[in-house]
Amino acid sequence: MKRGKKADDAAADGENDSGSASAKKTKKSKEPEAPVLYDAPEQLSSKDGRSANMKITSWNVDGLRAWVKNGLDWVIQEDPDVLCLQETKCAEKSLPAQITSMALFPHKYWAGSVEKEGYSGVAMLCKTEPLSVSYGIGKEEHDKEGRVITAEFPSFYLVTAYVPNASKGLVRLDYRKTWDQDFRSYLSELDVQKPVVLCGDLNVAHREIDLKNPKGNKKNPGFTAEEREGFDRLLEAGFADSFRHLYPEQANAYSFWTYMMNARAKNVGWRLDYFLLSTSLLAGLCDSKIRNQATGSDHCPVTLLLAV
């Protein structure tokens, strides 16, 4: 274990050295640069005047069994229609009773690694039963790691994903590039049928504004040119980053902080958790929030409000 995450499955593992080189040279730490959006009232209507009627929360929990001790109380207060979790690290047979008996979400779906127990894993918990649910993207090399669940709702598909990172030393960068291409094809095929909402830990900071120390991390997992270009291709395929669509220049807005060097208190972080939407859904976008006050993981939750 390293920084509370497996060295080969951390969200950009060597990446998240709190911004690395430039931070280490600073003799005196600066005051945290706090974001300004998180406690602002939610926008509950879209630009076309429709009221939000779908609230979805996504959270990389970095281990479900530890997270339930603190995270569930926040979820109950947030009260989303759908809760998507990543990096559950928990086989279905080992799920904590607090989750399996949770009446708030009567419809629960799980996917985990078929080869490594305690590795990867995603979940989707719904108040309303989806029309259908599927697991993976139809390619065994990816699906064996338990990284994707797709639920069909009347007017859209919801996909939650825990995207593989390139790992320390970029040893999985070639695999990540293959994943990005295959995952983009999968999402595009869904988009032909219905609009898509994608949420999860996408394991990339897209732009320099999306991490505290971009210059020191350009060769680290999560901020390589290849991973950022993969995100570019996804946007070019007809998807939009909901947070940046609403807040294009908002700096210091992060969803991941390493456990080391007091990074979270200093707000030295990365934005790795997203809601991407088919562009046809943008008219109904009400708000996209980063809930950086919620604790229980090295990631914080993100919440989407949508009129569908």
Image: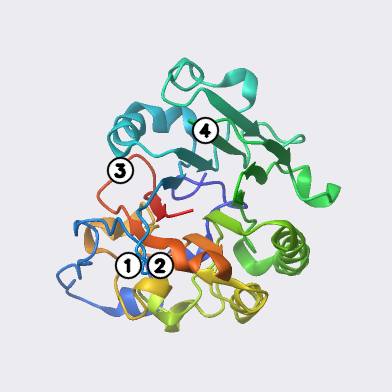
Q: Whole-Å distance between the Cαs marked 4 and 2?
A: 23 Å
Of the numbered discs in the image, which one, if any, rests on residue 125?
4
For marks 4 and 3, give the one nearer the viewer.
Answer: 4
Residue that mark 1 sits on: 253
Q: Whole-Å distance between the Cαs marked 2 and 3?
A: 20 Å
Q: Name, please, the residue furthest toward the bottom.
A: 215
Return the disc, 4 or 3, that comes first in the chain's sequence.
Answer: 4
Around disc 4, counting alpha carbons within 10 Å, would you say few (fewer than 14), some (14 to 19), or many (20 or more)? many
Question: What secondary structure is found at the residue carrying circle 4?
Answer: strand
Circle 2/circle 3 CB separation < 8 Å = no
Q: Position of residue 95 (x, y in %)?
A: 55, 21
- At label 1, the amino acid type is Ala
Question: What secondary structure is found at the residue carrying circle 2?
Answer: helix
Return the disc, 2 or 3, that comes first in the chain's sequence.
Answer: 2
Q: Residue at x 45, y 45 (%)?
A: 4
Question: What secondary structure is found at the residue carrying circle 1?
Answer: loop
Of the numbered discs in the image, which one, if any, rests on residue 243?
2
Q: Name, please, the residue furthest toward the front.
A: 49
Circle 3/circle 1 CB separation < 8 Å = no
Q: Residue at x 28, y 57 (%)?
A: 264
Q: Residue at x 62, y 39 (%)?
A: 121
Return the disc, 1 or 4, that comes first in the chain's sequence.
Answer: 4
Residue that mark 3 sits on: 295
Q: Position of residue 27 (x, y in %)?
A: 21, 76
Q: Nearer the viewer, residue 113 or 161?
A: 161
Q: Residue at x 74, y 45 (%)?
A: 136
